[in-house]
Amino acid sequence: MITYEQYTKNNTYYKPRTINLYFGEQHDQTLDRFTKLSKKLRRSRTQTLDFLLNYYDCREEDLKYMRVMG
């Protein structure tokens, strides 16, 4: 189980993890849509990304269930 202490700087094993997302000129609209969604959901970009990943996982589970049920 993950605890709050694992995410604090007091933990000697704490390592911040980051990634950079590059939206090139061809994907400028995608960046705008992502920013608008973050504002609409009133979440940070990281929280929005987490929301989208969770939504995707739930949707995949729903599709598996639909395939089984016929």
Image (tube, rainbow, N blue to C red):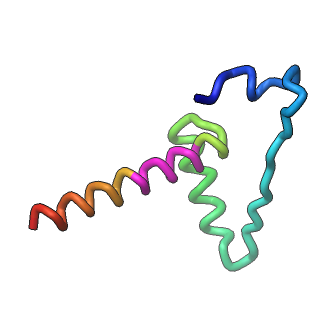
25 relative position to 50: left or right: right
Furthest toward the bottom, the residue is: 26
Residue 66 image-quadrant placement: bottom left
Task: Name the image quarter holding the C terminus.
Answer: bottom left
Q: Main secondary structure of the magenta part?
A: helix
Task: Look at the picture and state if 26 lies above or below 34.
Answer: below
* Residue at figure coordinates x 60%, y 40% from the top left: 47
* Number of dots carrying numbers: 0
Kindly indicate the quadrant of the structure image that contains residue 67: bottom left
In the picture provided, is 47 more to the left or to the right than 15? left
Q: Is 29 left, or right, of 53 in this rendering?
A: right
Q: Nearer the viewer, residue 58 or 24?
A: 58
Please provide percent x and percent y for residue 19.
78, 55
Tell me the residue at 90%/28% (across/down).
12
Q: In the current view of this chain or complex, which residue is farthest to the left?
A: 70
- Place of residue 69 in the rendered image (x, y in percent of width and height, measured from the top left): 11, 61
Decide which of 63, 27 is in the foreground and name it.
Answer: 63
Say if the magenta span includes residue 4.
Answer: no
Q: Is residue 51 within the magenta segment? A: yes
- Res 56 quadrant in image: bottom left
Residue occupying the point 74% across, 27% down: 6
x, y percentage for residue 17?
Answer: 80, 46
Q: Quadrant of the N terminus?
A: top right
The residues colored magenta run 48-57
| Relative vertical location of residue 24 with respect to residue 34 in this rendering, above or below | below
Q: Is residue 2 left or right of residue 67?
A: right
